Image (tube, rainbow, N blue to C red):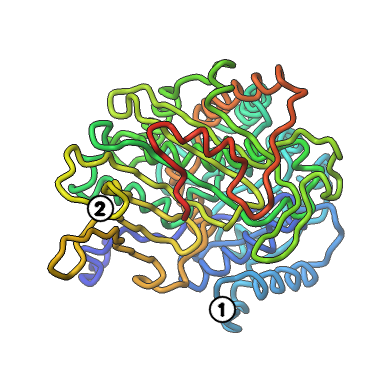
Amino acid sequence: MHAGPQNPLRQGLMEDRAGDACAVVIFGASGDLTRRKLIPAFYNLAVSRSLPSGFAVVGVARRDKSQEQFRAEMKEGVSNFSRRPIDPGVWADFERSISYVTGTFESEETYTKLRAHLEELDAERGTRKSRLFYLAVTPDQFGVIMRNLKVAGLVSPAAAAPGDPFTRVIIEKPFGHDLASARTLNDTVAETFDESQVFRIDHYLGKETVQNLLVFRFANSMFEPLWHREYIDHVQITVAEEIGIEGRGNFYEQTGVTRDIVQNHLMQLLCLTAMEPPISLRADAVRDEKVKVLRSLRPMEPSLVQTNVVRGQYAHGYVKGEEVIGYRDEPNVDKSSRVETFVAMRMFIDNWRWGGVPFYVRAGKRLARRVTEIAIHWKKVPHGLFQAPDGGIAPNVLAMRIQPDEGIALRFTTKEPGQHTILRNMAMDFRYGAAFGSNTPEAYERLLLDAMRGDATLFTRRDEVEEQWEFVGHVFDAWRTDANAPPPLYPAGSWGPEQADDLIAHGGRRWRKP
C-alpha cells in the first residue's frame, strides 16, 4: 500500500504522547482511588487529547451497580477531584468509554463475563485485544486475580513488537511489608506476567518536580560537575505532612511511617538524587542506575541503627493554631502503641561519587508544615575573606521542592548596597506555577499514560523493591530487639523529636526549615 504524504508540520515535533489503544480494567473500582485519582486522571487525559481513539475503562467490583449508576459515581468523582472542571462535550464522549462488571474476584464467572465484555469492546471501541489491568486492591488479592485472569485466557505473552496486542498490569503499593513478603508477591506476579509487563506504581515518581530532577542534573552542565563528594557537604531529604493518620488507625498500627513513606517514596527520591548518569533514557537504563545506588547503601547493622536512626510518635499539640490529639488517642490505635509516626536517618552511599557524604532523611506525620524537598548543601568556602553578621558565610544550598509550591531555589551570598561590605544570604527562586501555570498534570495522569505506552521508566522494577526492603529490613530487625523502648514523643506541629536535631548536629549541621 502506498503511504500518503507526510505532514510537514509534524517534522521536528516530539514523539506523540498518546497512549496505545487498549481497555483498562480496574479491579476494586468501587474504592476511593478510582473516583478520586484514576477516573479524574483519564478524564484529564481525554481533555488533553492524549487518550487513544481505541480506549475503554472497565470497573470490576463486587458491589452490584448498573452502568448508569457507576458512570454517575465517576462523574461525581471527576466533579470533586479533577484539576479541570467538567466540559459537557468532552464528558459526553468520555462517559461512553466507561463500563462496569459486577462480580467477586474469587469467582470464575466474573472473569468469564469480563472476557465477553472485553471482546465486545474490541469490536465496538477498537481496543485491539490489548489489556491494561489495574489492581486497586490489597496485596492479599493479587494472587487470586492474576490466577483467574490466566485461567480465563485474559493474559497473553509479552508483545513481540511495537503495535502488537499487549497485556500489562499495574500494581499499587504497599508491595509487601518486609523483604520476605515482597519476594513472595514478586513470585506470585511472575507466575502470570513477565517482568516487562509489570508496572509497580509509586505516584511520587509521576510528580513534575521529581521527573525534572533528571533533567536538572543531566541537561545542565553547570551542576553535574559539582554533584560530587568534593563539593557537597551533605544532603537532606524531607517528606513532612501536617495531617495525622486520617482515621487509618488499623492500617498505621501495622505499617508506621517507615513502611508507609521511607521504604518507597523517600528511597526513590534518594536514588534519583544520587544515581549516576544513565547511558540512555530507556526504562531499564535508568532503573539500573537506581539499583546501583540501593546496592551501595551502607547496611544498617544493629549498632548503626542506634546511632543513625531516630524514631518518634506525635503527641497532643497544635497544627496551624488548631488543637489536635496525639497518635495514641486516635481511633483504633493501641493506647501503648510503639508505632513510629516520625523517622530520621543518617545514611551513607559507599561509592566513588558519594563516599563520606551523609544523607539525612526524615519523614513524619503532624509536623510543622506539609513539604517534600531535596536540599543539596555545599561545603563552606575554604578561606573566609569576608566577615558575615553571624561570623561566617552560610554554605550554598540548592533546594528542590516536590510539594507544595513546586520549584527550585538556590541560596547564595551577596553584598548589600552601600559603602560597607555587609553580606546577606539571598535566594533565586524558580516556581513551576509562575513559570508554566498552576494547572500542571497530576502524577497519575503521567503514570497511566506511560503504562498505556509501555514506558516503565517511572515504575519500580522487582529488584528495586527488594533492595529497598533489604535496606529497611535491617532497621526493623534492630527495632524488634529493642521492642520495649517506646519512641520519643514530639508535640504535633513541631519538626519532630529533639533526638533528630542531635542526629544531624555533627559538624554544626542542622535541619533546614523549609
Q: Residue at x 73, y 45 (%)?
A: 137
> How many badges with numbers are in the image?
2
Kindly identify the amino acid type of the residue bearing the numbered disc 1.
Val
Give the percent coordinates (x, y) of residue 393. Answer: 26, 48
Residue that sits furthest to the bottom in the current view:
88
Q: Secondary structure at mark 2?
A: loop
Give the percent coordinates (x, y) of residue 348. Answer: 42, 26
In the displayed structure, would residue 306 be above or below residue 289?
A: above
- Closer to the camera, 322 or 289? 322
Q: Residue at x 76, y 45 (%)?
A: 111
- Closer to the camera, 215 or 493? 493
Find residue 388 and name its label: 2
Left-right relation of 121 to 210: right
The answer to whether mark 2 and mark 1 are in CB contact below 8 A is: no
Give the percent coordinates (x, y) of residue 109. Answer: 83, 45
Sequence order check, earlier mark of 2 and 1: 1
- Closer to the camera, 55 or 115? 55
Give the percent coordinates (x, y) of residue 503. Answer: 51, 33
**Residue holding disc 1:** 90
From the image, which quarter does the N terminus lie in?
bottom left
Find residue 394 and name its label: none
